Amino acid sequence: MKRRAALSTMGALALAGHRAFAQQPIVIKFSHVVTDDTPKGKGALKFRELAEKYTGGRVKVEVYPNSTLYKDKEELDALQTGSVQMLAPSTAKFRPIGVPEFEAMDLPFVFNGEEGYYKTVQGPIGSGLLKRLEAKGITGLAYWDNGFHMVSANRPLLMPADFQGLKVRISGSKIADLYFRKLGALPQIMAFSEVYHALQTGVVDGCENTPSNYWTQKFHEVQKHITVSNHAHLQYAVITNSKFWNGLPADVRGQLTKAMAEATQYTNSIAKQENVDALEKIKASGKTTLHYLDPQQRTAWVAALKPVYHEAEARVGKQVVDDLLKSAGIVA
């Protein structure tokens, strides 16, 4: 009797332990390299809110902003090894893992404004690029917008010749490397978290980024001139580890898919306004001078950078370049 009671008690304890284990939330570590108050930062927080809401607490999302967990060069390896479950890197970051085609989205002047950008990422070009990640154990979930690039230095950058000899920080994109070299600049690959100090100390002379990133990272405080050039677009691909994603219960995966769709809509809806607001704040700060390209200057940029389209084919593939140019109505 005593033995039977003991076994019964042990069974009950084991069952209770199993239930407690089963009730442990699924943890998603979401790492990124910008601050919480950027469009991407706010998007990650919105996803956390919606994911935990729609799964009824079965999923816990831990957001690690501003390179607090991994820097640019480390995060993709961390995703592939399962150290993190979700990232939102710029699309320029996929070349090191063998998917260089994404860099074609960095080509200058290939999007006809925001409308042209959305037409591209929401169509066959965008979905086709995400599909290429599957062979690397990565599942693409969405594209998040962050707007068009500006460029800055401690001298005005209005004509192509103004770039001659400048050390310009780039994120690692081979396309950005191409077009800055075409302008006579010297591209320098550098982690996003190191840019402010590098600009402040003169390790690099300038950089490119979106207005919201200039404002939140305070780049405008250490650059005397910013040109609102809109020469290239910055977008992020929200990605997850395929093994992790496919291993989720089907209902949880569906709830997270819904959360991601709504977080994406939210992020993209605020990106444009965030950049407008950031430009106003930068202007009001009085710490830098904003320049806007006139038609003649823009034409000079477009002409100077047109050879990049053909040169990019060897790096990212002719097909994706042709697809982007056709979508934009550009004759190279």
Image: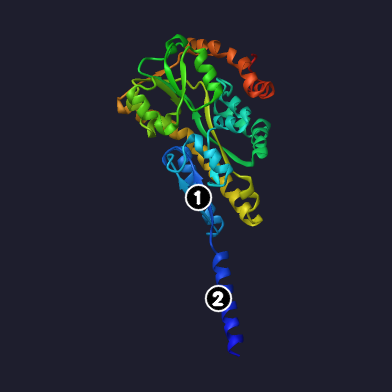
Q: Which residue is mark 1?
A: 48
Task: Give coordinates of residue 300: x percent, y percent.
Answer: 51, 10
Residue type pointed to by label 1: Arg
Q: Which mark is residue 138?
A: none
Name the residue located 56 percent from the left edge and 49 percent from the top edge: 259
Task: Give coordinates of residue 194: x percent, y percent.
Answer: 40, 31
Q: Is residue 227 above or below residue 75?
A: above
Q: Which residue is mark 2?
A: 13
Q: Is residue 315 above or below residue 191?
A: above
Q: Nearer the viewer, residue 189 or 318?
A: 189
Q: Quadrant of the C terminus?
A: top right
| Element type where label 2 sits in the image | helix
Q: Nearer the viewer, residue 57 or 18?
A: 18
Residue 265 in view (yes/no): no
Q: Nearer the viewer, residue 238 or 144?
A: 238
- The picture quadrant where one finds residue 67 is top left
* Residue at the front extreme, as displayed: 3
- The picture quadrant where one finds residue 311 is top right
Task: Give coordinates of residue 144: x percent, y percent.
Answer: 54, 37
Going from N to C along the chain, the mark reached first, 1 or 2, is: 2
Q: Is residue 139 above or below residue 105?
A: below
Q: Is residue 250 left or right of residue 78?
A: right
Q: Residues within 10 Å of mark 2 (few under 14, many from 20)?
A: few
* Residue at the bottom extreme, as displayed: 1
Name the residue located 53 percent from the left edge and 42 percent from the top edge: 78
Q: Quadrant of the N terminus?
A: bottom right
Q: Residues within 10 Å of mark 1 (few under 14, many from 20)?
A: many
Q: What distance separates the C-alpha of mark 1 from that of mark 2?
A: 33 Å
- The picture quadrant where one finds residue 313 is top right
| Element type where label 1 sits in the image | helix
Residue type pointed to by label 2: Leu
* Residue at the left extreme, as displayed: 286
